[in-house]
Image (cartoon, rainbow, N blue to C red):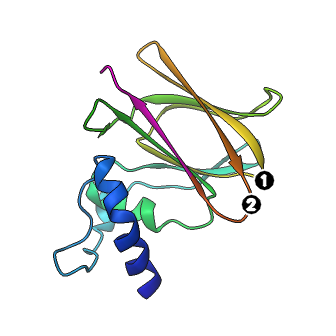
Amino acid sequence: MISIRVFLLCALPGLVLLGMPAIVSAAGETEPINQEAVQLSPQTQNGVSYLTGGIGEDETRAMLQARGYNLHIVMSVGAKGEYVPDVDITIQKAGGESVLSLTQVGPMVYVKLPAGKYEIVSHRNGREERQSVVLSGEASETVNVNWKGE
């Protein structure tokens, strides 16, 4: 419980900048999650495990508590970083080989991948964003995809 509290207290300033809804009460305690409002279901494609969600505060809190995923992708639009749930994502190995291809997902996607260098190609409303990430296999990495002009 203490590790979750420490994580939330350390991560909260960055999450607020991303436009994430407040998930910690004034006393620093996490609010209980309404499990009926959470529609998360771990999935696998090409041997790659992933989780997608983050719609609403309960689902966002549930995503933040998910463990075992070393790549966290957060998708948003505009200067305020408002979450968007309608993004097509392809994750490719350094040589261009696709390892995961998802349609109409978000605003958060968590993926478990082997260590290595990957490119994340995101499409929304005819626009493309590309970002590279190196996964060490030890720590998780977060990639923020933002369409600023929307």
Q: Residue 137 carries which label?
A: 2
Residue 93 relative to residue 24: left or right: right
Q: For mark 2, give the secondary structure.
A: loop
Q: Tell me which amino acid carries mark 1.
A: Ala
Viewer-proximal residue, 79 or 97? Answer: 79
Residue 1, can we see it?
A: no
Which residue is drawn at the image coordinates 32% and 60% (left, top)?
Answer: 13
Evaluate if marks 1 and 2 touch, with contact meaning CB atoms under 8 Å apart: yes
Residue 148 relative to residue 103: left or right: left
Q: Residue 115 carries which label?
A: 1
User: Label 1 vs label 2: CA separation?
Assistant: 5 Å
Residue 52 relative to residue 38: left or right: right
Which residue is drawn at the image coordinates 74% and 60% (left, top)?
Answer: 137
As drawn, the residue found furthest toward the bottom would be 2
* 27 to 49, vertically: above or below: below
The local crowd at label 1, few if under 14, some if 14 to 19, many if 20 or more residues have their Cα within 10 Å, is few
As drawn, the residue found furthest toward the top would be 126
* 21 to 101, vertically: above or below: below
Which residue is drawn at the image coordinates 56% and 67% (left, top)?
Answer: 67
Q: Residue 8 carries which label?
A: none
Decide which of tag 1 and tag 2 comes sooner along the chain: 1
Location of the C terminus by quadrant is: top left
In terms of secondary structure, what is the magenta stretch mainly? strand
Write down the quadrant of residue 35 in the picture.
Answer: bottom left
Q: What stretch is highlighted in magenta?
A: 142-150
Location of the N terminus by quadrant is: bottom left
Where residue 9 sits in the image (x, y, percent)? 35, 73
Write down the quadrant of residue 46 in the picture.
Answer: top right
The local crowd at label 2, few if under 14, some if 14 to 19, many if 20 or more residues have their Cα within 10 Å, is some
Tally of numbered tags: 2
Q: Tell me which amino acid carries mark 2.
A: Gly
